[in-house]
Amino acid sequence: MVSEMLDAYFHPTPQDDWEFVVYRNGNPHSIAGFACYGPTPLADRIWDLYWICVDRAQQGNGVGSQLLERVEANLRARGARALYLETSDSDAYRPAREFYEHHGYVPVAHLDDFYAPGEGKVIYCKALAQ
Ligand SMILES: CC(C)(COP(=O)(O)OP(=O)(O)OC[C@H]1O[C@@H](n2cnc3c(N)ncnc32)[C@H](O)[C@@H]1OP(=O)(O)O)[C@@H](O)C(=O)NCCC(=O)NCCS
């Protein structure tokens, strides 16, 4: 998944469904964070957030918020109905879940033992209709 995503970023083709928002700190060779998202196949104006990631040294400074808000603004402008994402229910991902909930994402499904015995998947959704 990660190598596919990076390939789509560095070698984009017109067929790609992956889109990216990249945060640079004024330096073209340094990336503070990025978000990757795309349209959900076979769903009417529903999008998936595949990945959002901020450089560990720069977390907690609002970079993730700006990335997510930019993704949402892009999608609202294009008439998206909702953005979905999924993450782990493990303690390690608690900060990520809190970040999403802080931004208005609502847990809409919980699949126990999805990633591994004892580690489930939480699906979050945010309605984007204007
Ligand atoms: C999750 C992540 C993208 C958030 O990005 P960030 O730049 O650190 O977050 P921000 O500084 O924009 O935080 C925005 C808000 O979310 C909340 N938040 C962020 N990290 C939090 C944490 N660890 N615990 C609780 N709340 C947190 C803050 O309260 C902050 O609120 P404020 O705007 O009132 O100050 C980033 O921490 C990250 O890359 N984590 C590792 C990768 C990851 O887990 N990605 C998600 C995979 S599902």
Image: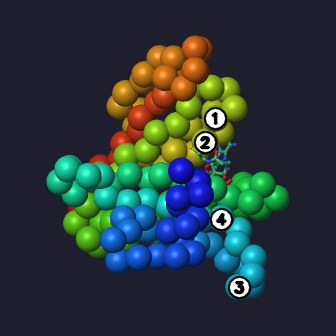
83 w.r.t. 106: above or below = below
- Residue designated by label 3: 28
Foreground mark, 4 or 2?
4
Label whose residue precedes the other's in the sequence (2 or 3): 3
State whether label 1 is within 8 Å of ligand 1: yes
* Label 3: which secondary element: loop
Of residues 128 and 88, which is closer to you in this image?
A: 88
Circle on res. 93: 1
Give the residue type at disc 3: Pro
- Badge 4 or badge 2: first in the primary sequence: 4
Q: Is mark 2 within 8 Å of ligand 1?
A: yes
- Mark 2 neighbour class, 10 Å CA radius: few under 14, some 14 to 19, many 20 or more: some
What number is the disc on residue 33? 4
The answer to whether residue 86 is above or below residue 119 is below
Secondary structure beneath label 4: strand
Mark 3 in CB contact with mark 4 (< 8 angstroms)? no
Is ligand 1 less than 8 Å from the beta carbon at label 4? Answer: yes
Q: Classify mark 3: residues with Cα within 10 Å, few (<14), some (14-19) or many (20+).
A: few
Q: Is residue 88 above or below residue 64?
A: above
Image quadrant occupied by the C terminus: bottom left
Q: Say which element carries label 2.
A: helix
**What colouring style does the render use?**
rainbow
At 26% from the left and 61% from the top, the residue drawn is 80
